[in-house]
Amino acid sequence: MKILLMGPPGAGKGSQAEKIVNEYQLTNISTGEMFRESYNNQEPIGIEAMKFIEKGNLVSDEITNEVVRLRLLKKDAARCFLLDGYPRTVTQAVALDIMLNEMNSKLSAVINIVVDHEIILERMVGRRVCRSCGATYHVEFKPTQKKDVCDACGGTLYQRNDDKPESVKNRLNIYQNKTMPIIEYYRGRGILHEVNGMQTFNEVYKDIQNILGEPV
Ligand SMILES: [Zn+2]
């Protein structure tokens, strides 16, 4: 099972991805996470990537493709994976096809979570992340018991620079212009499934489960 999870920033991809990989025993490959981890380790690639991410811009195709290629070659990605946050441009989608082809592999399904952009803006500016464990919350939809304190570990919450309004608007524009064309690319190949992301978390997950079938 090789799945690609798509949707605009703030569509709830991250939390759906987490549930899917647990239920279906898939390797989660999130480029956002990989760049952030690399940045935290102060690796040159991470430092370079974060300059783009913080402004809501895309990391170059060249860097992103290479990071994904190296990740896909690791043993745990050989059989099943879920890709989240990649590809973001048609160039990356084509590069992914070539990589998978070289590994005698291909995508089984592309799931696109659809959400109106006004709703996304509202969702994202309220998002808060724990500085210690990375857990995510929302000031309105998923508040912590104590303001700005992580329920899981007691760490301090903060707003990621890429969740600030000007950055979110920039990300939505980029999504519209660069990433939307990929949807058509996969629709043309007949592996695209669309899910209404303006439902509760569980309803969205149920729709995804209907597409993937029950976990074995
Ligand atoms: Zn925490």
Image (cartoon, rainbow, N blue to C red):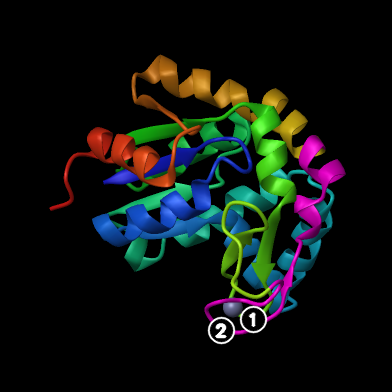
Query: For the residue with label 2, is its CB less than 8 Å from the closest atom of ligand 1?
Result: yes
Residue 188: percent from the left, percent from the top? 42, 15
User: Which residues make up the magenta segment?
Assistant: 147-169
Q: Nearer the viewer, mark 2 or mark 1?
A: 2
Q: Residue under circle 1?
A: 132
Query: For the residue with label 1, is its CB less than 8 Å from the closest atom of ligand 1?
Result: yes
Question: Does residue 5 sit above or below 185 in this rendering?
Answer: below
**Foreground pick, 138 / 19:** 138
The residues tagged by marks 2 and 1 sit, at their Cα atoms, a distance apart of 8 Å
| Residue at the spot 45% in from the left edge and 49% down from the top edge | 83
Amino acid, disc 1: Ser
On the rendered structure, is 55 left or right of 159? right
On the rendered structure, is 114 left or right of 195? right
Residue 79: mark in rendering: none
Amino acid, disc 2: Cys
Residue 12: percent from the left, percent from the top? 53, 46
Q: Do the residues labelled 2 and 1 touch (CB within 8 Å)?
A: yes
| Residue at the spot 76% in from the left edge and 29% down from the top edge | 173
**Foreground pick, 88 / 104:** 88
Residue 94: percent from the left, percent from the top? 52, 32
| Residue at the spot 48% in from the left edge and 61% down from the top edge | 71
